[in-house]
Image (spheres, rainbow, N blue to C red):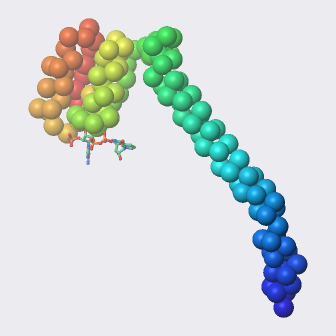
Amino acid sequence: MKMAEFLRGTLLPLISDGNSIRQVLLVAGLYFSLRKGFSFIRSGYEAFKTFGLPLVWPRNFSKEYGQWAVVTGCTRGMGLCFVQELAKKGMDIVLIGRSIHKLTKIAADISNHDVFLLSI
Ligand SMILES: NC(=O)c1ccc[n+]([C@@H]2O[C@H](COP(=O)([O-])OP(=O)(O)OC[C@H]3O[C@@H](n4cnc5c(N)ncnc54)[C@H](OP(=O)(O)O)[C@@H]3O)[C@@H](O)[C@H]2O)c1
């Protein structure tokens, strides 16, 4: 009974009135457009903060965090990227891994940077 009243009293007039439907769709469209736009601007800001800002305003990691960094899982993937980037920034690194061969190879690969490396 209540459902029928709802249909008759609220939904049917809304559907039969073209302007109301247009307004609802307009509000929904505006809402989703604003959400998408905000998310796009936020992604752009994050990308700028991560990739753009360090180019114009480099950070001194040694000063901020101390001269030594410890990287576990450093033989490949993200750990290896961390090692390479920290070495570029002139930080001394403790490399922690399971394979001495891989650790030796990494140490050899980044020996051109003037940094201390300690493999464990
Ligand atoms: N890649 C991504 O986009 C991403 C995103 C979010 C989170 N993560 C997480 O970040 C971590 C690293 O990701 P990744 O993509 O760089 O992974 P990966 O390429 O698989 O690298 C894993 C590293 O961890 C070491 N490792 C694996 N199992 C180990 C174990 N049982 N004991 C000690 N060391 C071990 C590996 O050493 P060996 O060379 O000796 O095997 C290697 O150095 C993972 O936990 C991953 O779930 C990754």
| Quadrant showing the N terminus | bottom right
User: Quadrant of residue 43 in the image?
Assistant: top right
Q: Quick check: 47 above or below 109?
A: below
Please state the horizontal and vertical placement of residue 100, each as a whole percent of the image: 14, 33
Q: Is residue 50 left or right of residue 23?
A: left
| Quadrant showing the C terminus | top left
User: Quadrant of residue 16 in the image?
Assistant: bottom right
Q: Residue furthest left?
A: 101
Residue at figure coordinates x 30%, y 25% from the top left: 83
**23 or 54: nearer the viewer:** 23
**105 or 1: nearer the viewer:** 1
Q: Is residue 109 left or right of residue 43?
A: left
Residue at figure coordinates x 30%, y 28% from the top left: 81
Q: Quick check: 11 above or below 84?
A: below
- Which image quarter has ligand 1? top left
Residue at figure coordinates x 48%, y 19% from the top left: 52
User: Quadrant of residue 19 in the image?
Assistant: bottom right
Q: Is residue 100 left or right of residue 85?
A: left
| Visible residue check, residue 93 | no
